[in-house]
Image (cartoon, helix red, strand yellow):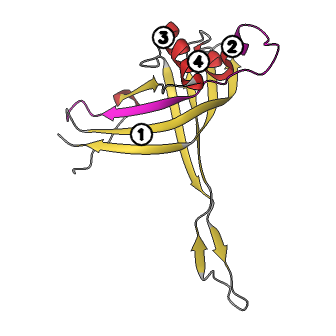
Amino acid sequence: MASTVYRGSDGTISVAVESGLEGDKAKAVNDAYALTPIGRVTGVTVRVTNDVKPFHELGQRFPTELRPGNINVYGSIDRAYINGALLKLMLGDAADSRPAATFVSPSFNLSVRLENPSLPGTSSTVTVMGVKLEEWFYDLPEDDFAMEKVNFRALWVKVEDAAA
């Protein structure tokens, strides 16, 4: 596969849902706000960490073995369009009123697709699976654009590359 470079303007971000209580809550928000693609996004970060543990033997300064540990998937989305959709994806039923008891937290898959317009058919897609939003920020500066930002956690991530 030939290597290509991408810019943020080559990307699209979309929400996909799986069946089940958490997916159904996310689907309701996705349908109401037409989040495919998610518009006005100015930045997306996806991070995958592997808690690597070094094993040090007595008398050795360098580790003799590196053991893989827990894998964590998380990231953030910056958006210059405030309409409540991302907050509702985080809170579910609690975004409209205070529920009397426990409530379902929406879960969805987030797909980030990049395609260089000068190489149609060549693309790279990162899909973050089982996303739950954990933090929502709202920033209203005096002389700049109103921005919202969400931080998320996910169960796992997959990558798909396609060549023309």
Q: Amino acid at mark 1?
A: Val
Could you say where residue 21 lies in the image, as x and y percent from the top left?
A: 59, 23
Kind of residue at badge 2: Asp
**3 or 1: mark nearer the eye:** 3
Give the CA distance from mark 4 to mark 1: 23 Å
The residue that label 2 is drawn on is 93
Residues at badges 3 and 1 in contact (C-beta under 8 Å)?
no
Q: Is residue 164 magenta?
A: no
Disc sitting over residue 146 in the figure: none
The residue where tag 1 is placed is 126
The 10 Å Cα crowd at callout 1, few under 14, some 14 to 19, many 20 or more, is some
List the residue tagged with mark 3.
31
The mark nearer the N terminus, 3 or 4, is 4
Q: Position of residue 150 (x, y in %)?
A: 63, 27
Say whether residue 100 is visible. yes
Q: Which residue is mark 4?
A: 25
Query: Label 4 near label 2: C-beta < 8 Å?
Result: yes
The reply, left or right, for residue 75 in relation to residue 2 is: right
Q: Nearer the viewer, mark 4 or mark 1?
A: 4
Label 3, secondary structure: give it: helix
In magenta, the rendered stretch is 93-119
Number of numbered markers: 4
Mark with earlier residue (1, 2):
2
Q: Is residue 147 visible?
A: no
Identify the residue at horizontal 21%, vertical 43% (top origin): 163
Which amino acid lies under the numbered mark 3 shown in the image of this protein?
Answer: Asp
